Amino acid sequence: MAPLSSCPDRHCRFPFFCSLSIVAIVLSAAFVTGCGSGGTSSTTVPGNTNVVVLASSTANDQLVEFPVALKNLTLTSQSGKTVTLFSGLLSAEFIHLNGNVEPLETIRIPQDTYTSASATYDGTDPVCMGLQTDSTSFFIDGAINGPGTPSVTVNLPAPIEVTGTAMGLVLNLQVSQSAPFSGGCVQGFTLPVAISPVFNLTPLAIATQPTNSANGKALGLQGTIASTSGSGFTVTAPIGYFNGYSPTWQVSTSGSTLFQGISGISGLSTGMPVDMDVALQADGSLLATRVAVYNADSTNLGLSSGQVISADPSQSSVNGLTTQMVGDISTMYDVFGYATAASQISGQFTNLQNLPFVATFNAASTVAGQNVLVTSNAPPVDGFEPLPLPSVTMTLMPQTINGTVSAISASGGFTTYTVTLAAYDVFAEFSGQPGQPALTSPSTVVVYADSNTQMLISSSVDVGGVFRFYGLVFNNNGTLSMDCAQVNDGVAE
């Protein structure tokens, strides 16, 4: 696999898109005879801890992709000792992880207090999108690295104490600092941005029963089945565009694992795409709490997920899906015909019937900006011809929006937040394209939060505040409405 810096030019109108056992803490006592006292004292030798490295990001809505490939990640302790968390190329696409987490690697390291970290990287390619001046077509523009020497920075906001049987370390990409876009996208390929990834590395304590991204729950992991064995299976994470070194997850199941689209683990087969939620366990292993299969046929599989750029039911195609992709880059597009596809909604949410509006998703209501997962079983074709592949399924998936709260109300047992989006948000930017359903206010999303919504915020949600909301975005008769699962502090727009 070529490094990112040597991959082909991506600027085209239609781009593609162990289990480890519990570590015994070894204690040894060194008995030393005290001078003249005949007493003894003991010294504890530190043991090891299973550390799960998790990718995450903190971002507004300006970019649609930000893949980063790292060569290594190293910690240094207060005594100057170093440990390597991983070496060899490993990558993730960080925008779809905005406010959420995704496991990258699990490693056993010595218990100690670590005060600094460093990393080197192989390449990156942040992407923004916009409309052409005639407002009838879109463009996708990757940033061109500006002045200065690219580098990667890993900040520790506070020393990290590695202790216990297992814990997490969250590698959180600070997107605005890493790629400081000013003025948004431009037409053409002349966008000089000084790209130097900046990460914050923070500890994560694993809850007994994780419920959110802050205590060990990873939501909506997508990939394809690499193998199955007994009550467990291995998933290969998707390949984001320009992002060829994705992680592999070894996952176990239990009697409480919820299977959707299949009856159980026996229904999984090699090559099958899955969408799953996993909970970190006390030993750092991954337990699937939900496994969803939206298309059980892996024959000639074509799969892509990300935000819709152009939705036109009259042309029966979705153009320009971004971020994740599974399959051979040379034989895939991101243009799918969806007029006859089975429309589905992510199984991650169980409260749709309680919403005070009818939560529907179908070809006629699809709008640019919605996050979808599309599958096709059409025979592969060569090249990048903008011809639609016939879709078998199209599934509405959760996404994160960043915006300013302009009003707070209540409706049918839900708290509603009216959220104003930035002008560069995909919903707002692409709403004027011809052919797609009209939106009453494309720069506004009404967010519905109930008692199960995870509030991972430093202060209460108030009017005028900027927050990130994670959930399913529906076209509710022309009004963008979100069923919200999680709220995080926002990012300046």
Image (spheres, grey):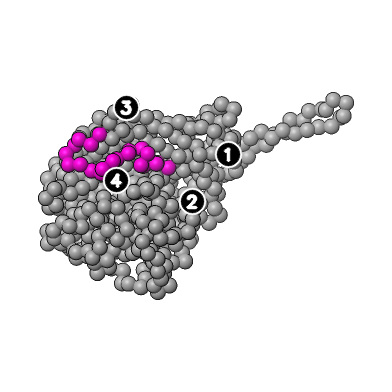
Badge 2 amino acid: Ala
- Element marked by disc 1: strand
Would you name the residue on which mark 1 appears?
161
- Residue 177 percent location from the top left of the image: 37, 39
- Whether the magenta-drawn stretch holds residue 187 is answered as yes
* Chain-order first, disc 4 or disc 2: 4
Q: Which mark is drawn over residue 330?
A: none
Which corner quadrant holds the N terminus? top left
Residue 479 position by quadrant: bottom left
Mark 4 to mark 3 CA distance (whole Å):
21 Å
- Whether the magenta-drawn stretch holds residue 261 is answered as no
Residue at figure coordinates x 38%, y 51% from the top left: 221
State which region is magenta: 172-192
Mark 4 to mark 2 CA distance (whole Å):
23 Å
Q: Nearer the viewer, residue 225 or 421?
A: 421
Q: How many residues crowd mark 4 within 10 Å: few (<14), some (14–19), many (20+)?
A: many
Q: Which mark is drawn over residue 214?
A: 2
Badge 4 amino acid: Leu
Q: Nearer the viewer, mark 3 or mark 1?
A: 3
Q: With 364 as the anchor, is 229 left or right in this view?
A: right
Q: With 467 as the anchor, is 127 left or right in this view?
A: left
* Chain-order first, disc 1 or disc 2: 1
Q: Nearer the viewer, mark 4 or mark 1?
A: 4
Mark 4 to mark 1 CA distance (whole Å):
34 Å
Residue 142 position by quadrant: top left
- Element marked by disc 3: loop
Q: Which mark is drawn over residue 148?
A: 3
